[in-house]
Amino acid sequence: MLIAVPDVLTADELTRVRAVVEAGDWADGNATSGAQSALAKRNAQLPEESDAAREAGALVLDALARSALFVAAALPLKVFPPLFNRYTGGQAFGTHVDNAVRIRRGSDFRIRSDLSATLFLSDPQDYDGGELVVEDLFGEQRVKLPAGHLVLYPASSLHRVEPVTRGARVAGFFWIQSMIRDDGDRRILFELDGAVQAVAADRGQGDSAVVRLTGVYHNLLRRWAEM
Ligand code: NI
């Protein structure tokens, strides 16, 4: 399941993140790739340990923690500190699957990547191409969102970034280990959560059916969550 999360960053946060990222020292993107990805990947990236990546990543993590939609959709247990990449001049990232396990260099922080996330930082009118294409059961989904918006997709899916033929596509990207490992189980909880919110908006949070449905949500989460 692909889920778009609009307006993760406010306009001010977007300006700040962009300024920090653009002032950073960019390097060849293959620094973070596995051997197979390295064959497919052509872009620039902010080194993981750089001050710019850390500062911008911290801003993004703060914003994510405030996003009710992100939390409901991802049910995050651990979030990998965001990294940043840039595609220009025909650069692209061919079809690949993200590594199952991500380890933060020089630390014991490791996550299983259940979900991949792309946070768009460039306005779509500022570049051509650069769509994120995700293959799922229903075929190819092509994603190109406004700056400050994020897309979540299963880290297990084949995906690619189309060549950027004009301008620059700058984005944050990272992985999430979810409390709910299985994509289908996570989807059920997300749908139930949305339905309960809709009924609550109609009947009020104190309505007895809303209280019981909220209980069902939490009891499913209790049953399935891994910590
Ligand atoms: Ni990827």
Image: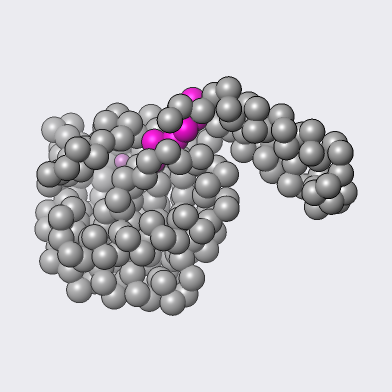
In this rendering, position of residue 127 left or right of residue 87: right
When asked about the image quadrant of residue 114, the answer is: top left
Q: How many marks?
A: 0
The x and y percentages for residue 144 are: 45, 55
| Left or right, residue 6 beside residue 63 | right
User: Which quadrant holds residue 23?
Assistant: bottom left
- Measured as percent of width and height from the top left, residue 14 is found at 40, 71
Q: Is residue 150 visible from the viewing direction of this image?
A: yes
Residue beneath the point at 13% across and 66% down:
25
Q: Position of residue 125 (x, y in %)?
A: 43, 70
Residue 43 to residue 96: above or below? below
The reply to whether residue 87 is in sight is no
Is 22 colored magenta in this rendering? no
Q: Quadrant of ligand 1?
A: top left
Let me know if residue 182 is in the magenta part.
yes
Which of 63 and 161 lies nearest the eye of the viewer?
Answer: 63
Q: Quadrant of the C terminus?
A: top left
Query: Is 90 on the left-hand or right-hand side of 15?
Result: left
Residue at 23 percent across and 60 percent down: it is 53
Residue that appears at 66% across and 37% down: 191
Q: Closest to the observer: 41 or 78?
A: 78
Residue 160 pos. (x, y %) = 33, 42
Quick check: 214 left or right of 50? right
Residue bounds of the magenta highlight: 176-184
Q: Name the residue rendered at 44%, 35% in the picture.
A: 178
